[in-house]
Image (spheres, grey):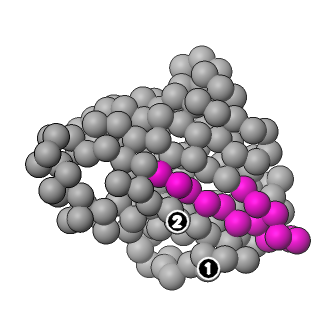
Amino acid sequence: MQMRSSVCIEAPAAAVWERLADLESIHLWVGSIRSSQCPTTSRGVGAVRICEVPGATVRETIEEWIEGRSFRYRGEGAPMMERATNTWTVDAYGSKTLVTSTAEVVVKWSWFGRLMEPLLKPFFVRLGTESLAALKFLIENGRPYSGPARRLLPIPKMC
């Protein structure tokens, strides 16, 4: 199952990259993550981020890192997911920045999971869009959004 979401943020690419590349701060803009930490290094290939979500601990390992531009991680341990990868990219458009998340998820439960994908995909897409909206708010306002992220929608998907 593949998903792609983007958001245009009213901030320079360098500022957006610094927030996005601060791996330990993801809990400030992804509502389902209660806490996040990097036990050793917190940047670059090989960094590991541990995220606590309700009922699970998710381990994300950075597999690709292009400073100032993009990173990809492989996640394991998330509810309903056998494994997942996510690539984050930052593209400058003058004083604005387009952030894109491209995720690939393999659902648990073999053939049954495959049958469930059409029902699960809208849920995952909504969560991704809400997270991008919360990231946009955090960067543009300098503080996390305190309400449900769905109230921040709709968001500009292009710059």
Q: Which quadrant does the N terminus fall into?
A: bottom left
Q: Position of residue 151 (x, y in %)?
A: 44, 78
Q: Is residue 25 above or below residue 11?
A: above
Residue drawn at x 60%, y 76% as measured from the top left: 157
Q: CA distance from mark 2 to mark 1?
A: 11 Å
Residue at (75% x, 38% y) in the render: 66
Instruction: Find residue 5 and name its label.
Output: 2
Q: Amino acid at mark 1?
A: Pro
User: Can you say whether 106 is above or below 40 in the image?
Assistant: below
Q: Which region of the structure is painted magenta?
A: 90-103
Q: Residues within 10 Å of mark 2 (few under 14, many from 20)?
A: some
Residue 52 drawn at (x, y percent): 37, 36
Q: Position of residue 96 (x, y in %)?
A: 79, 71
Magenta-colored stretch includes residue 132: no
Q: Nearer the viewer, residue 134 or 157?
A: 157
The numbered dot on residue 156 is 1
Horizontal arrangement in the rendering, residue 131 relative to residue 78 (left or right) = right
Q: Residue at x 23, y 58 (%)?
A: 117
Nearer the observer, 138 or 61: 61
Q: Could you tell me which residue is drawn at 11 percent across and 48 percent down? A: 112
- Specify whether 103 is left or right of 42: left
Q: Residue furthest front?
A: 111
Q: Position of residue 51 (x, y in %)?
A: 43, 36
Looking at the rendered structure, the number of numbered marks drawn on it comes to 2
